[in-house]
């Protein structure tokens, strides 16, 4: 099959220097940082622009990320690539943990166990990915995230362990 000019698509996006947010790392609580992103005081991280995320809500130990599937998310089989969904799940679970952290505490994902339950396509409509903290100790936290489609059907689920650490002060 030969590609024609009408088969070609393009996408352009921009982002803010991640050093802008990094300057606040360790100086604000996780919840304060996330709320500053939602209000527009701080920019979203570049990964949100890359993914094409289209909404974000935050509360203590709970984060919801929205994404409307697009063609550029597709794998060769004509559905949203599992890596896109895993990134969405990791973002929601990790940010839920971040929303519980005091100033001076950081985190990083240790693992992500993901289950894909149904194919996601453009026809799935806007996805809602909610992350919640299940347990938090001094050095680790366990969170989960779910993705539901516009019809409320569960599309994917993940659990994540995060390592908590003292943030370096700049």
Image (cartoon, helix red, strand yellow):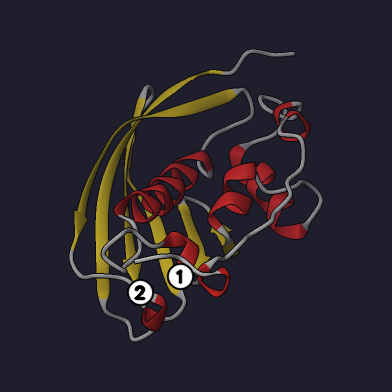
Could you tell me which secondary element the residue under label 2 belongs to? loop
Q: Nearer the viewer, residue 112 or 46?
A: 46
Q: Which mark is residue 69?
A: 1
Q: Position of residue 156 (x, y in %)?
A: 26, 62
Left/right placement of residue 145 relative to residue 25 reads left
Q: Which mark is residue 24?
A: none
Q: Is residue 117 above or below residue 168?
A: below
Count neighbours of disc 2 (C-alpha within 10 A) and say few if under 14, some if 14 to 19, many if 20 or more: some
Q: Position of residue 121 (x, y in %)?
A: 35, 74
Q: Please name the residue shown 41% across and 48% down the image.
A: 87
Quadrant occupied by the C terminus: top right
Q: Is residue 37 above or below residue 101?
A: below
Could you tell me which secondary element the residue under label 1 belongs to? loop
Q: Is residue 44 above or below residue 160?
A: below
Q: Please name the residue shown 39% across and 45% down the image.
A: 90
Q: Please name the residue shown 30% across and 54% down the image.
A: 82
Q: Which residue is mark 2?
A: 121
Count neighbours of disc 1 (C-alpha within 10 A) and say few if under 14, some if 14 to 19, many if 20 or more: many
Question: Label 2, label 1: how many angstroms apart (C-alpha)?
Answer: 6 Å
Q: Are marks 2 and 1 in contact (CB under 8 Å)?
A: yes
């Amino acid at each position: 099959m030969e590609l024609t000019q009408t088969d070609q698509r393009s996408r352009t996006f921009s982002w803010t220097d991640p050093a802008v947010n990094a300057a606040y790392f360790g100086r604000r609580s996780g919840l304060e940082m996330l709320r500053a992103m939602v209000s527009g005081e701080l920019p979203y991280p570049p990964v949100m622009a890359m993914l094409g995320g289209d909404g974000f809500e935050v509360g203590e130990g709970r984060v919801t990320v929205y994404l409307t599937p697009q063609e550029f998310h597709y794998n060769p089989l004509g559905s949203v690539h599992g890596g896109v969904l895993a990134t969405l799940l990791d973002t929601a679970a990790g940010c839920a943990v971040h929303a519980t952290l005091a100033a001076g505490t950081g985190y990083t994902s240790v693992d992500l166990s993901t289950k894909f339950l149904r194919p996601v396509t453009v026809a799935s409509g806007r996805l809602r990915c909610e992350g919640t903290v299940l347990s938090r100790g001094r050095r680790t936290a366990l969170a989960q995230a779910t993705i539901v489609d516009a019809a409320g059907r569960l599309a994917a689920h993940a659990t994540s362990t995060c390592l908590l650490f003292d943030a370096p002060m700049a």
